[in-house]
Image: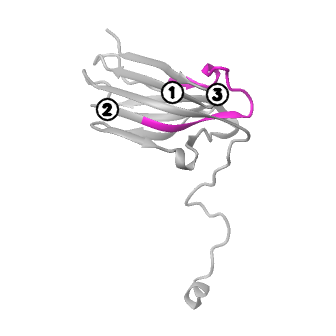
Amino acid sequence: MANIVDGNIIGESDGAVTIAYYLQSDGAAGELVNQPVLAASECSPPLGAGQYLSLYEIWYQANGCSLTFAWKTLQGAVPFWILSPGVDSRHKFHRFGGLIDDSGMYAQGQLMMSTNGFVQTGANLCFVIRMRKHSGQTPVYKAIGQPQGQLPLETNLLNS
């Protein structure tokens, strides 16, 4: 027997695509590592230059394993979200535009998934994700916690 990895596009429009997945471990085949979830080329019509995807909403239930989402790049996978085991949950990211494929010039337009703890017999996970299709230039994000310029002097802060 092999792991069950069953995914289907259950809805698609000009601006969004909704996907449902069910994963079940056979206890022997091992972890999923950078398994494709959806590529921009699988959308109808396929997304091209200047278009990108963002994760807008997710509903999930996990039993005995966790799942990490990552964007594929030429240099590997860039992880950005983890689904925790033992949780029946829903997350919405639409208020800030979604979790965007911001992997830069090496972006491949593909959502990947990897498991942790999926080697246990009976570990399973199901999720439904709603992804938004975007046109235009991918936003440029600023790294948090890295100096972006000169900090104000302590004396100026004390005097204000």
In this picture, residue 143 sits left or right of residue 90: right
- Write down the residue under mark 2: 62
Question: Which residues, given as a range, are shown in magenta?
Answer: 36-58
Mark toward the start of the polypeptide (2 vs 1): 1
Quarter of the figure that contains the C terminus: bottom right
Mark 2 vs mark 3, foreground winner is 3
Cα separation between marks 2 and 3 = 30 Å
Mark toward the start of the polypeptide (2 vs 3): 3
The image shows residue 45, relative to residue 128, as above or below, that is: above
Mark 2 vs mark 1, foreground winner is 1
The three-letter code of the residue at mark 3 reads: Asp
Residue 43 at x, y percent in the picture: 61, 22
Residue 156 at x, y percent in the picture: 61, 86
In this picture, residue 147 sits left or right of residue 128: right
Q: Tell me where residue 114 sits by quadrant.
A: top left
Cα separation between marks 2 and 1 = 19 Å
The numbered dot on residue 18 is 1
Residue furthest to the bottom: 159
Q: Residue at x 50, y 45 (%)?
A: 93
Cα separation between marks 3 and 1 = 12 Å
The image shows residue 101, relative to residue 43, as above or below, that is: below
Q: Residue at x 29, y 16 (%)?
A: 26
Q: Residue at x 63, y 78 (%)?
A: 152
The numbered dot on residue 14 is 3
Whether residue 11 is visible, yes or no, is: yes
| Residue 39 shown in magenta | yes
Quarter of the figure that contains the N terminus: top left
